[in-house]
């Protein structure tokens, strides 16, 4: 939605600029200078893993994963064929859905200011662990999620069941914990 809004604002600004220069009483003026390109974060040279969890993703999803700006994780191979990957400038997301469950895995390297010690006092300590990192597990309206950090990347995985009150994958922690532990690195670092 923000991308569409930004595109509309940009197109409107260009149209207004064109109208202003073509209807100027003193004749056409020079176009305004183009803005300097915004620097993009550098992405280390990585290749996609040949693990079945990556290799059996749909072709479009593998292409998106290849342009991920961060070292992304993917769902185990059993979920690959029905997974969809999307990547942006500072994030990557994977979604899976079947008749009984929806899974969303997201990663972002967009930093936010850290909470102060006073703000942290009100939060419970992380009680879960994902890939050797402390993680916070939450449940909101039947959607169970885990969030953790690896390096400078924040990851989260959430599951939503079609029968949230009776499907043990959503009523208990075990399924989500096992799923998160089975995530597969999607990229391999290239030696330079």
Image: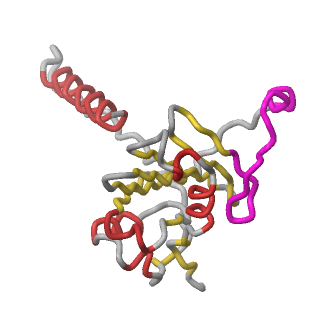
In the figure, 68 relative to 53: above or below? above
- 90 in the magenta segment: no
- Place residue 70 in its image quadrant: bottom right
Outermost residue toward the top in this view: 25
Image location (x, y in percent) of residue 18: 18, 28
- Residues drawn in magenta: 116-136
Report the front residue among 168 and 38.
168
Horizontal side of residue 181 vs 98, given as left or right: right
Q: Report the residue at 82% width, 31% height from top.
A: 116
- Place residue 7 in its image quadrant: top left
- 135 in the magenta segment: yes
Report the front residue among 186 and 104.
104
In the figure, 58 relative to 168: above or below? below
Q: Which part of the image, by quadrant, shows the N terminus?
A: top left
In the figure, 129 relative to 117: above or below? below
Looking at the image, how many numbered discs can be counted on the residues? Answer: 0
């Amino acid at each position: 939605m923000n991308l569409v809004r930004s595109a509309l604002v940009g197109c409107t600004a260009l149209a207004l600029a064109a109208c202003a220069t073509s209807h100027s009483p003193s004749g056409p003026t020079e176009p305004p200078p183009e803005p300097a390109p915004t620097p993009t974060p550098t992405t280390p040279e990585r290749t996609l893993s040949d693990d079945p969890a990556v290799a059996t993703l749909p072709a479009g999803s593998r292409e998106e994963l290849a342009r991920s700006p961060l070292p992304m994780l993917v769902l185990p191979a059993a979920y690959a064929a029905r997974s969809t990957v999307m990547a942006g400038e500072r994030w990557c997301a994977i979604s899976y859905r079947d008749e009984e469950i929806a899974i969303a895995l997201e990663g972002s390297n967009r930093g936010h200011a850290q909470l102060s010690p006073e703000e942290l006092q009100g939060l419970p300590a992380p009680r879960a662990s994902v890939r050797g990192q402390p993680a916070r597990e939450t449940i909101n309206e039947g959607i169970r999620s885990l969030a953790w950090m690896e390096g400078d990347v924040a990851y989260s995985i959430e599951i939503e069941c079609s029968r949230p009150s009776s499907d043990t994958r959503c009523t208990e922690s075990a399924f989500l914990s096992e799923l998160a532990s089975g995530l597969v690195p999607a990229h391999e670092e290239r030696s330079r």
